[in-house]
Amino acid sequence: MAVAPSAGEAPPLRFHTKVLYAVGGTATYLKLRALSTFLVIFYNQVVGLPPQLVGSILAVALVFDAVLDPIIGQISDNVRSRWGRRHPFMLAAALPYALAFYLLWNPPADWGHGALAAYLAVCLFAVRFFDTFFELPHQALAPELVKGYDARTNLLAMRHFFMVLGGLGMTVLAYQVFLKEQPDGSGGVLAREGYVAYSITGALIIFGTIVLSTLGTASRIPHLTQAPVRKVTLKAMVLEMAQTLNNRAFISAALAMMFIAVAVGARNGLEIYFGLYFWELRQL
């Protein structure tokens, strides 16, 4: 597929712009750690839904995400606008992503299992949808900001640093501040009220880092690669996605990442259960 070149010679990417780009990685990993660590025990032990129902909704959401990713990526690759082909998606995701994250941890207290299951499904799908809406264009932006293997590796390493910082930092805050167990036994991961402040803080971080990263790299839009000038049809998009999915190297990498994600998610989700109910440990 031919891609239109960027408009003019791009000036070197300044350090502060690299940092502002990398900060955007915070949102996705914060969401990832929150869902894999606390979501199952929150909806099972705090809200009261059966664990098999929560697990089924999570599995369906993963399938939904797997179908959605190539579609959003394909659309982003072909969008032409005054804000380029990445930034409109990134900025549009900020507010609904943050709102969906907040709502996910604040379900109504007086609903039945069926209504709560539907609420979980809608909020979880919304979180994953808007995360994809931001994350895919944000990742695709990196090779357009800098050229060359070393420069791209440096930029993505910086992004990974903020990803780990966001996920790990928010988890530490959860255990030490929002969901901390008090000396009298109150609080902890089974106390519903702690998730209110946790969700508000997480939503604000998601919104702030997305907006900061989007606006912080907006000055580079005139120098980014533009989408090709062509008539994009649904058939052509499907064929291009099929060609990508038919690549053996891609399939191998995707399957490997799928098994890794399942293993990591299962470990994180069950870790709290083992600590609380098998080892009968207390939070410190």
Image: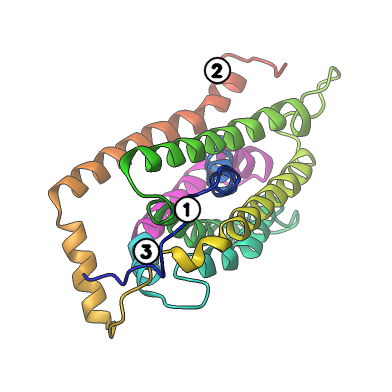
Which image quarter holds the N terminus? bottom left
Question: Which secondary structure type mostly characterizes the magenta part of the structure?
Answer: helix
* Residue 254 in the image, given as x and y percentages of width and height: 26, 45
Is residue 52 or residue 36 the one in the foreground? 36
Q: Which of 187 and 113 is in front in this view?
A: 187
**Closer to the observer: label 2 or label 3?**
3
Residue 233 position, x and y percent, is: 27, 83
The residue lying toward the viewer, choosing from 130 and 57, is 130
Q: Which amino acid does label 1 sit on?
A: Ile
Tag nearer the camera, 1 or 2: 1
User: Disc number at residue 278?
Assistant: 2
Which residues lie in the magenta part? Answer: 38-67
What kind of element bears circle 3? Answer: helix
**In the drawing, what numbered circle is on residue 73?**
3
Residue under the image location 43 percent in, 36 percent down: 154
Does residue 58 belong to the magenta stretch?
Answer: yes
Label located before the other in sequence (2 or 3): 3
Q: Residues within 10 Å of mark 1 (few under 14, many from 20)?
A: some
Magenta highlight on residue 153: no
The residue sitting at 75% across, 49% down in the picture is 200
Q: Which colour scheme is used?
A: rainbow
* Residue type at numbered disc 2: Phe
The image quadrant that residue 167 belongs to is top right
Q: What kind of element bears circle 1?
A: helix
**Which residue is denoted by mark 1 in the rendering?**
57
On the image, the x and y values in percent for residue 50 come to 55, 44
